[in-house]
Image (cartoon, grey):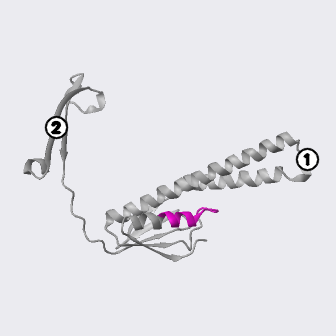
Amino acid sequence: ESLMSGDSLQGEASLYEVGARPGDHRPNGSGRTRLMVKLVLWMPKQEAREATGQMLVEGTPEEFLVATIGDGVRWVINGDRIRSQVVGYDRARKRRAEDLKHEKRWPARRREAWLREGREAASRQQHRLATYCHEVSHMVVERARRAGVAEIVLDLSRAWFVRPFPWHLLQEQLAYKAKERGIVLTVSASAP
């Protein structure tokens, strides 16, 4: 519609042929190939609307984060994957510490290998958590931007779903990304 009305700048139109498959929904399954059209055009940016309202983002005992926008529009990040990774790593770390107690007297070579494995596992876990905080903060801020929200209110007072978790890192990432998008971040309670 934008191209036909003249609002968009016309680019290239290409015709090309691709192989057909049974799932292409062709009448009677006819033909081995199908004809495709590729249109290239520049579309004008839509004007940004005025941001208003709040999005409440809270940690709960049942889900990682729950965001509520306006009249109760609920958006959930369950976080089951990160919970199992955090719990699994924490359990393995505690068991490794018990096995490495001085009274056990493991040979030096084996002990050093276990210590090295522990450091590598800790490094992987830190990277995993940093990546997860980056992904979640990006999702939350982009959801707020799409909803036209001016303020994100973060409440982590009941964030018991994942323990231990670097909530401060998530909060820092949210603050950085929200500021970048012109959204105000208000922290209403401290992390558990």
* Left or right of 186 on screen, residue 35: left
Three-letter code for the amino acid on which mark 1 is drawn? Arg
Which secondary structure, mark 2? strand
**Residue at image location 84% in from the left, 39% down from the top:** 109
Q: Nearer the viewer, mark 1 or mark 2?
A: 2
**Residue at image location 19% in from the left, 51% down from the top:** 43
**The furthest residue to the bottom:** 188
Question: Residue tagged by mark 1?
Answer: 105
Residue 12 bears which disc, if any? 2
**Residue at image location 30% in from the left, 32% down from the top:** 23
Where residue 170 sits in the image (x, y, percent)? Answer: 53, 63
Where residue 9 sits in the image (x, y, percent)? Answer: 14, 47
Task: Establish if 185 lies above or below 37.
Answer: below
Q: Which of the image's four quarters has the C terminus?
A: bottom right
**The furthest residue to the left:** 5
Residue 62: quadrant of the picture: bottom right
* Left or right of 73 on screen, residue 122: right
Which secondary structure, mark 1? loop
- Whether residue 66 appears in this view of the structure is yes
Residue 23 bears which disc, if any? none
**Viewer-nearest residue: 127 or 61:** 127
